[in-house]
Image (spheres, rainbow, N blue to C red):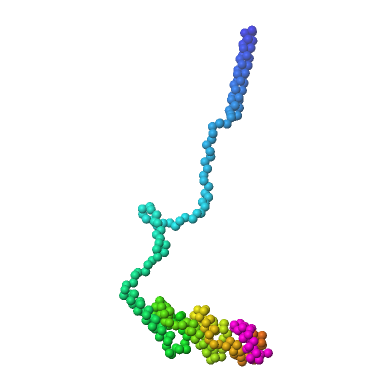
Amino acid sequence: MQIGSKAKKDMKKNIIIITITIILIICFVIFLFISNGHKPPDQTPMPPPVTTPETTTPPVTETPPEQPPTGTGETIERQPTATEDETIQPPKKTKRQLKEEKKRKEAAVKTAKDYVNNKNFTLTAHSLYSIKEYLEENKKFSAEEAEYGAENCGADWNEEAVKAAKMCLELETKVNYSYSKKELSKSIERQWKFTPEQVSYGVENCGADWNKQAENYIKVMLDKDPKTKKEQIVKTLTNKGFNKEEINYGIKACKVK
């Protein structure tokens, strides 16, 4: 009986030891699990994240014009133009060409003189422009030859401008028209292309009576409309270039009230 009770005690003791051992093992396992779950982060530096460049459009910059390929990989340099490098010289003329050119210019001068001094054209005015036009269109000289002939024909352009002014005044009597000094200047400048100085000389020396011109102009207006008022006459003649003295003379002469 005593042996049996001892064996039970030993068995209980062993069970307790085993139980404790198991509990210790479980605790150890739990400790290890908990320890691994709270492990501090690895201190090894991580490589920087790889980033891809953004697909943004680069700024537009001006590029020089492409040079045509040379086949050798070299760039063709721009060659300077004639105006950048040197003035292009015309080919030299031969002696025969120079002689012919001189002969043609002399012929242009003679033709221009004959044209100016023609007795059939004594009442016809000539200007540098009209003579050049005549030589080119009627006599088929070149522009250079015609200009040379006109410039060397010996004409007095001031006197020709006087002649042109007189022609206009004579024509006005035929068409019942009158000129102011301003309108006559415009007329001969437009038709003959005289210079301003030549026009001024021609108008001042043509012998026109500007008071009479104003009177004749008013008469024409009254012939068309006898009821034309004085205010309208003054306005019209002022626009035509007559001055106050000329207008007043015409109004008084025509007895406009």
Q: Quadrant of residue 78?
A: bottom left
Picture coordinates of residue 6, whole percent (x, y): 63, 10
Residue 190 shown in magenta:
no
Residue 241 shown in magenta:
yes
For the residue pair 198 and 28, the one nearer the viewer reads as: 198
- In the image, residue 59 sits, relative to residue 200, either above or below, namely above
Left or right placement of residue 176 versus residue 255 in this view: left
Q: Quadrant of residue 106?
A: bottom left
Left or right placement of residue 223 versus residue 122 in this view: right
Q: Could you tell me which residue is drawn at 45 percent across and 80 percent down?
A: 128
Left or right placement of residue 171 versus residue 227 in this view: left
For the residue pair 126 and 174, the one nearer the viewer reads as: 126
Q: Is residue 48 visible?
A: yes
Picture coordinates of residue 13, whole percent (x, y): 63, 14
Start and end of the magenta stretch? 235-257
Q: Could you tell me which residue is drawn at 50 percent across and 80 percent down?
A: 198
* Residue that protrudes farthest toward the top in the picture: 2
Q: Main secondary structure of the magenta part?
A: helix
- In the image, residue 73 sits, relative to residue 4, either above or below, namely below
Picture coordinates of residue 231, whole percent (x, y): 66, 85
Give the number of marks. 0
Q: Could you tell me which residue is drawn at 52 percent across and 36 percent down?
A: 47
Picture coordinates of residue 52, whole percent (x, y): 51, 44
Left or right placement of residue 151 versus residue 255 in this view: left
For the residue pair 9 and 47, the one nearer the viewer reads as: 47
Q: Could you tell me which residue is drawn at 68 percent across and 90 percent down?
A: 257
- Locate the N terminus and report the quarter of the image it occupies: top right
Q: Is residue 146 visible?
A: no
